[in-house]
Image: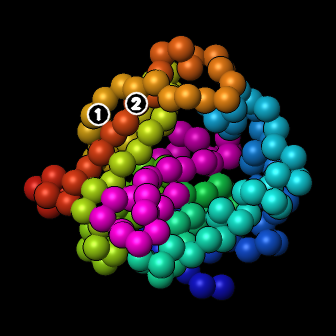
Amino acid sequence: MHIFLETERLVLRPFTEADTDHLLALDSDPEVMRFINGGRPTSREVIQARTLPRLLHVHPCIGTRGYWAAEEKATGVLLGWFEFRPLDDHSCAVVELGYRLNKAAWGWGYATEGSRALIRKGFTDLGVERVTANTMTVNAGSRRVMEKAGLSFIRTFTGDWPAAIEGSEHGEVEYELTRTGWERHP
């Protein structure tokens, strides 16, 4: 197994098609999907036709993928995934940070630990200049992770989403961390 990144408690590795059942379970949990699509489960067909191709895509500018399966190092249990994806396939200057972890992994600091490690790798090894992250304004847990990982609130905005979900009337928030900001407070 190729390991992209290790932390004290996590192993981030590339996804494979063998992860389909884990992704299906993750994206079928109403609480996990609450701020993504209002809690609706994702079908196996969507996982195979849309989710997996996105997770398996290699970004030419960094020569690797932008999504990583997150396993608990001690047990090998798949906890979910992290996103550290260039917004432009041909430039790694700006990447989007994201994470989706199963409910059992919430509150244990995994999202912050993985996010900080990806940010460090991005600024030291991958040529990243700016990390950005978005979530619904009402998603306090995700916002807290962004702040603990060193990102700062930039703005509130309204997206043109296909369907309104509870809380979407409050809009989305964008956070960021620049290389310069990180170098001042790594």
State which quarter of the image contains the C terminus. Answer: bottom left
Name the secondary structure under disc 2: strand
Q: Is residue 93 magenta?
A: yes
Most frequent secondary structure within the magenta stretch:
strand
Which circle marks residue 58 in the picture?
Answer: none
Establish if 65 lies above or below 181.
below
Amino acid type for the residue under numbered disc 2: Val
Residue under pointer 2: 173
Q: Quick one: label 2, few (<14), some, or many (20+) residues within 10 Å?
A: some
Spot occupied by residue 63 in the image (x, y as percentages of width and height): 47, 82
Residue nearest the observer in this picture, 158 or 52: 158
Residue under pointer 1: 153
Q: Residue at x 66, y 21 (%)?
A: 165
Name the secondary structure under disc 1: strand
Return the disc, 1 or 2, that comes first in the chain's sequence: 1
| Image: magenta residue range | 83-109
Establish if 40 lies above or below 8.
above
Q: Quadrant of residue 45?
A: bottom right
- The answer to whether residue 119 is left or right of residue 23 is left
Q: Quadrant of residue 146?
A: top left
Amino acid type for the residue under numbered disc 1: Phe
Residue nearest the observer in this picture, 73 or 157: 157
Spot occupied by residue 120 in the image (x, y as percentages of width and height): 31, 66
- The answer to whether residue 181 is left or right of residue 63 is left
Establish if 58 lies above or below 152.
below
